[in-house]
Image (tube, coloured by chain):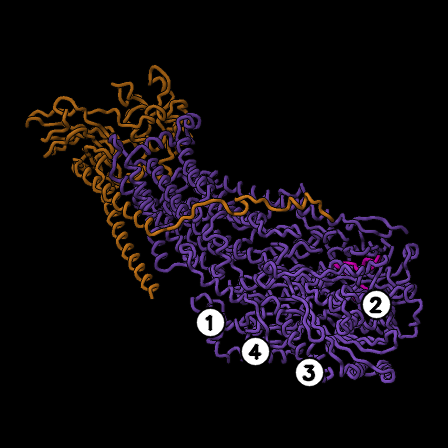
Amino acid sequence: MKRTSEESQSRLPDNSALKQQQLPAYRLQLTATGVLSGFFATGVFCLGVGIILILSAKSIKEIEIKYTKICGNCAKLREDATNFDKECTCSIPFYLSETMQGNVYMYYKLYGFYQNLYRYILSRSNSQLMGTDLKDVGTCAPFSRSHDGTPIAPCGAIANSIFNDTIILSYNLNSSIPIEVPMLRSGITWWTDKYVKFQNPRSKNLSIAFAGTTKPPSWAKPVYELDQEDPENNGFLNDDFIVWMRAAAFPTFKKLYRRLNRIQYFTEGLPAGNYSFNITYNFPVTRFRGEKSVVLSTLTWSGGSNLFLGLAYTVTGAVTWLAFFSMMAIHLMLKDRKMFFTQQ
Amino acid sequence: SHGIAGTWLGEMALCAKKRPPEEERRARANDREYNEKFQYASNCIKTSKYNILTFLPVNLFEQFQEVANTYFLFLLILQLIPQVSSLSWFTTIVPLVLVLAITAVKDATDDYFRHKSDNQVNNRQSQVLIRGSLQQEPWMNVCVGDIIKLENNQFVAADLLLLSSSEPHGLCYIETAELDGETNMKVRQAIPVTSELGDISRLAKFDGEVVCEPPNNKLDRFSGTLYWKESKFPLSNQNMLLRGCVLRNTEWCFGLVVFAGPDTKLMQNSGRTKFKRTSIDRLMNTLVLWIFGFLVCMGVILAIGNAIWEHEVGVRFQAYLPWDEAVDSAFFSGFLSFWSYIIILNTVVPISLYVSVEVIRLGHSYFINWDKKMFCAKKRTPAEARTTTLSEELGQVEYVFSDKTGTLTQNVMAFSKCSVSGRSYGVGDVFDVLGHKAELGERPEPVDFSFNPLADKKFVFWDSSLLEAVKMGDPHAHEFFRLLSLCHTVMSEEKNEGELYYKAQSPDEGALVTAARNFGFVFRSRTPKTITVHEMGTAVTYQLLAILDFNNIRKRMSVIVRNPEGRIRLYCKGADTILLDRLHPSPQELLSTTTDHLNEYAGEGLRTLVLAYKDLDEEYYGGWAQRRLQASLAQDSREDRLASVYEEVESDMVLLGATAIEDKLQQGVPETIALLTLANIKIWVLTGDKQETAVNIGYSCKMLTDDMAEVFIVTGHTVLEVREELRKAREKMLDSPHAVGNGCTCPEKRSSAKLPSVLEAVAGEYALVINGHSLAHALEADMELEFLETACACRAVICCRVTPLQKAQVVELVKKHKKAVTLAIGDGANDVSMIKAAHIGVGISGQEGIQAVLASDYSFSQFKFLQRLLLVHGRWSYLRMCKFLCYFFYKNFAFTMVHFWFGFFCGFSAQTVYDQYFITLYNIVYTSLPVLAMGVFDQDVPEQRSMEYPKLYEPGQLNLLFNKREFFICIAQGIYTSVLMFFIPYGVFAEATRDDGTQLADYQSFAVTVATSLVIVVSVQIGLDTGYWTAINHFFIWGSLAVYFAILFAMHSNGLFDMFPNQFRFVGNAQNTLAQPTVWLTITLTTAVCVMPVVAFRFLKLSLKPDLSDTVRYSQLVRKKQKAQHRCLRRVGRTSSRRSGYAFSHQEGFGELIMSGKNMRLSSLALAGFGARSSSGWLEGLRRKKSDSAGSPSAGPQKPLRG
């Protein structure tokens, strides 16, 4: 079989850079200058950032008070679920030796509470929380419907287990009269959560909107009574509820509860002095050997107290420099030796 | 016409149904109805696997036979169980469907081409005698029992019984190079009763029945009987034309189809194609099994953790999260969590691994196809990677098994030099050994033969002084060429006046006679009794008195002629070793100069012959002729008596000169062999050709050199002899001062750093040449190790006179015991078995037949491209594949192990760290393309460096770049990365808050942080691993990062959430999390901590223990290795060693054939009354002598032909 000349011509491979593996390219080489200067620069950067972070972490004032043991009788009471309607309060006085300058944030912190369990995290219905379809409780097992089959709103394990202690901070200006420290309960959520992810069903009256649903089994009040004073903070749009619904990554976590309203005595922050937390103890933790605490903290540019990151950076920087010097030494030694050999 | 394309592609399947094994075959000519009873295979070949209907089910069935695919199917099923499922079903099904689809498309394309080539072969036309007339029928319609007509230069379509031919006595000539690699023409003869059936009408009435052995793979034997007209006629291989042969010098012939299609000897010989897997494949499978084991271990650990956690904590936590209805105990929960973790952690062996490996190999094979430097301009054939699954194995080859004819040599003999009465003519090849053209000016013009109208235009000679000598009438020169024009067994054919064609039985003789023709001594025609030569324009007819035929022992042939003047002269040509002892002792000076010339020629690897003559007086001749007649009529020991009669007359001859014939090597063969040897690749030549020829080629391509301490030649005929010879060879090697240790021994030892040099030192000194019949013994089970040990200690091994099966056996032997990667390269059908047996088979394309190419994995048209295939493409492929695998395992361990650490913080509840979309896309989108780009394009050193420093090839042979150790290093790096990837964000998130005071450590932010730092870390790592940053690499690496962020933001966008609130739960997460300085500081720190140690480690390795490739890359000055190469390539000068490079790829018996006149047309011998001669003997003699001299072990006992 004779091939035509065109055919055989076409069998000649193209002379393109790609096909001949001749693409122009940068050959990556680990040169001594490059590597050493890279290590040096990284060391400088890490040390610098580390020191800045440590300094700013040091500037933060933070107070944490674990109140599970302090309020031991309340904890005992809550271990029995039948006592759900009995109120239990607990007051914890403390002394603030230094003024907490600037914005002060109040957190509740839980120890050993697993918000990150696989089935727990899944147990919510975003379409319900968006207010579009209150009856959509399909993903909420095991808290999707009450015994009579009424859909629960908000459904799911996360919503059911909401943190429901109330914590009020009081300032004892003088030894006698405690003043309730003004706190803001808004602005503690992400904008997207409050305005995209959570929406109340469209209706003038929330209680009507939630008709046909029932409250989660552990809740004392239905969802539309979470904050009856502020309609913007009620129903699914309740900030405390939204904060709780953003599940924590680790079994020990703190969630923002209130932030200081800087008025009256508190324009500069929290002045030093005697304070007390007045806690209505509702949330049982001793059942699963957990603990609760309340935290007051100030902030810096990088957020709250974060010594770990600063230390990690400092150590990394130090090790990088150490590596830099030893590599430099080895490099110089080898260079000398090579020159020695070539001279011979 | 091109070869029998596609016929013997792998996976032979019959068109017909499976039949019970045959015990004997019966085929009646021209009787299809009768033959149909037996349901013999038709001549139709089917290599395709599917048709349109069966494609999907069959292909899917096949794909699920792959363990990996079944494993992923199993995972998919697991994921459908809600209690166990911890990932959505799409995380597995998307990659699985992708993989299945890609493979299916590839299979479909392959099968399409198989269909095409099947069709092409099956529809090749042949002329079949049907109902009394010749009809064009496609090959596939040819049936057993049909009579078909073949024409000159056509391929034989099936195994045929030759019935008649255009030549007298039903002779026909075939070239069997495709079958057994022998280059000389073979003659086949129809049995006398059928040879008269020349015309179609008589053939149509022929109703003989052949009864013969069932199909088998023995190429050189056939036994059967023809029953016709109530007589029996024995049939032998001498009457058969086998599929794959080419008809030559015969205008037409008729044959009866005995075996068709898959039953033909050729097909039976080609063996079954095994699916070839590379060593990396096998290693990968082992590693994947280990990883499964590791996976199960992790699953068990986490499951136990889960059981304990549920027992201690979970059971108390039930107020917030009651157990699932199905779960009644912590233990059962642990059991379920085991399966959940198996699902989550399965990404350590992602399905995309297999696809990516295939894609990379596909890329590499395209590079081979596209390589301009492997394109042969002359034959217009590019290199072709016919298999796309072996590319990295090309970088690990340790043994190359090469065919000789057509692979190392061009199978072209050129009259290169000659010595005429003490003067040497000819400048030899214009290309010196290095393959460079001789410098300009030095190069002479080719001799102008225009004075001679009968000259062959294609003949070239580079020294015009010889022609001048002839023209001047130098009597020695005249006698020299007269001898060449008289003393041979060539047949001439003159279709038109002056248009001469020589039918030479061996190409050497053809070259010699053609040389004489061009120098004015034109052999014109012959009859059984005369030879007509045009001597410088005048026709002279010599009376041919006798041909003293060639045989292997005599190593010479002579003719005795009477010239027109009546003088009787004996002309003799033969091997120097033989002939120089039989010369008249007088002119000592001439003898010594000629000997010098012979040594010089032999040193250049030329094939030499010594020419001599002797005058006989009438009286002596008369007596001698009488003695010869008596000897030839003797009943017993006829051979010996004839030999002594010949011996008597061939003495006291006068030396005329010597010829040197160049068995033209393929271009660049010696350099390639030298380079491959430097790259520590051992080259074994396996040839069906004779020992002398093979050794000669060994010298000319510098496999054998005179520097060698000894060339062991093993020719023993019995087991004991062979064993003894091998033992002696080993003893010699061990005794020699160079041998520090026994070099060969085990391959494990070789991997330790020092040993190879010792081995080389030993190997450099010796070579082994072994004959086919010795090899048969050496390959027996109890001796094969001895043989292997001996052979491996030699630098060069040449096996000659080996059968196709033996070639495969040798390859299998090395494969089995050396655990080394083998490559077989060949061009003919006789190489098919070896090509299939070796790890990598390479076919030389661009030749007539393409069987070897069809069976091969790679094909190109020149042996020299092998160096580029191995040293450039193979090396790169291996490097890329290893880097790819290292990185791939690393990135998946880094990715997956994070879940393991997280398990300890989430109650072992099979919570994933990442969003499920990230898990789905990580392997197929975010990290696939950069590593693919590296796997396809990476280069460590420029291609010319791989040629300059062949030692760069060594890491592949020693398996250094990816082995179990490297694997563990990658895994360790991956686990290290995963630890940092989890614990640094954990440390940060445990305490930190966002800069607006809100919680930072929510699950979704953590997921996004870890995922982002993972993508960044593995991108930086691929950036470090990529040694060759092309635009494509840039595009893929930066593109992948960009795509990651794009998809991240898209998935976390409000729009998607509004549409599918339950599917896209991460709304707003990306912008909220990635706006935090803490998050970025965490990501930066993670990246630095993950990458810095790697950089430091690589830098230190580079400074303290650099590889050769590092050295080559970083310095331009090292030229030591190159010098060594040049030294090795230096032309071997005059040698003192004496070799008989004599040129006779010749078969005994042709002299007798000529003297009987059997092969001449009746018209041309009308005058010659030769009938008196007993004509029975020659063919039998031809056959017997051949089998004796070949001694081929598979040539079993044969029934003598009575006929």
Determine the secondary structure under disc 3: helix
Amino acid residing under circle 3: Gln
Using the image, determine if residue B271 lies above or below residue B139.
Answer: below
Eye-nearest disc, 2 or 4: 2
Host chain of mark 3: B
Question: Residue B758's mark?
Answer: 1
Q: Amino acid at mark 1?
A: Val
Tell me which numbered mark, 4 or 3, is placed earlier along the sequence.
3
Q: Which mark is residue B533?
A: 2
Q: Secondary structure at mark 4?
A: helix
- Pointer 2 or 4: first along the chain: 2
Measuring from the top left, give residue A20's x and y in whole percent: 54, 47
Give me the C-alpha separation between circle 1 and circle 4.
18 Å
Residue matched to label 3: B588
Q: Position of residue B858 (x, y in %)?
A: 60, 54
The answer to whether B250 appears left or right of B669 in the picture is right
Residue wearing tag 4: B729
Between B1190 and B31, the one lying in front of the other is B1190
Q: Nearer the viewer, residue B812 or A78?
A: B812
Q: Name the residue located 63 percent from the left edge and 75 percent from the top edge.
A: B599
Chain letter corresponding to the colour purple: B
Of callouts 2 and 3, the N-terminal one: 2
SS assignment at label 1: helix
Q: Quadrant of the C terminus of chain B?
A: bottom right
The magenta region covers: B236-259
For disc 1, the chain is B
Amino acid type for the residue under numbered disc 2: Val
Q: CA distance from mark 3 to mark 1?
A: 47 Å
